[in-house]
Image: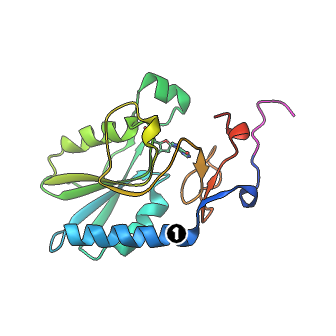
Amino acid sequence: MSSSTPVFPPAAEMEILFSKQQIADRTREIGAQISADYKGQSIVLIGVLKGAAIFLADLARAIQVDNTFDFVAVSSYGRARVSSGAVKLIKDIDNPIEGKHVIIVEDILDTGLTLSYLRGLMLQHKPASLKIATCLDKPERRLVPIEADYIAFKIPNQFVIGYGMDYAERYRGVEDIRIFPAEVAGH
Ligand code: IMP
């Protein structure tokens, strides 16, 4: 097989890092925390496509306060993006957020480049407040100083798939979060 041929091993063969149940429990906890923090207020959840779509769907259903959601998409150049630090907006929010309480919802906070770019961009819209919720946080990989306000799980420097997260667009629908084999990912 040529080295450029993508290899997609079955997800069932990969080690489970967080089970469907663990994810559901943690998402419910974060939903309850957000509901308490924003009691009596309305919030706008802004999901970062595509990875955060599934986390946002579950989180929104775990939040008891009035909420709406919107999505943004940013360009992804993989490792090239990390080395250049360049992040580009592909899809902006549909509705104004000025004066609103906003939570950006992300799948993984990794180098921090994506979220620091998005935070800066959203602040230009003058929201009443801006927080970040992330399903996973890889603090070891940070290149720019940024922290999330709500974190489901902190993980070491491992490449993971499932629950919205992909490897070459595959595995987003896998229900657990699993460790993608390092030898395949080349990490
Ligand atoms: P960063 O914080 O700007 O480096 O970018 C985070 C983005 O990189 C996430 O939203 C994911 O799309 C992607 N990413 C980082 N680590 C992983 C991983 O382990 N699996 C899948 N995608 C990842």
Residue 36 in the image, given as x and y percentages of width and height: 22, 72
Q: Residue at x 84, y 30 (%)?
A: 2
Q: Quadrant of the N terminus?
A: top right
Q: Residue at x 13, y 54 (%)?
A: 128
Residue 78 in the image, given as x and y percentages of width and height: 54, 33
The image quarter in which residue 134 lies: bottom left
Magenta segment range? 1-7
Find the residue positioned furthest to the bottom.
Answer: 64
Q: Is residue 187 magenta?
A: no
Q: Residue at x 68, y 40 (%)?
A: 182
Find the residue positioned furthest to the top.
Answer: 84
Residue 49 in the image, given as x and y percentages of width and height: 45, 51
Q: Which residue is mark 1?
A: 22
Residue 35 in the image, given as x and y percentages of width and height: 25, 72
Q: Is residue 2 magenta?
A: yes
Say which of 53 and 64 sits in front.
Answer: 64
Would residue 167 be found to the left or right of residue 63 on screen?
Answer: right
Would residue 4 be found to the left or right of residue 57 on screen?
Answer: right
- Examine the residues drawn in magenta and state their main secondary structure: loop
**Other-residue count near label 1 (Cα within 10 Å), few / some / many at <14 / 14–19 / ≥20:** some
Q: Quadrant of the C terminus?
A: top right
Would residue 99 be found to the left or right of residue 103 on screen?
Answer: left
Would residue 178 be found to the left or right of residue 73 on screen?
Answer: right
Q: What element does badge 1 sit on? A: helix
Note whether 7 is above or below 68 in the view shown. above
Q: Residue at x 46, y 38 (%)?
A: 140
* Mark 1 residue type: Gln
The image quarter in which residue 87 lies: top left
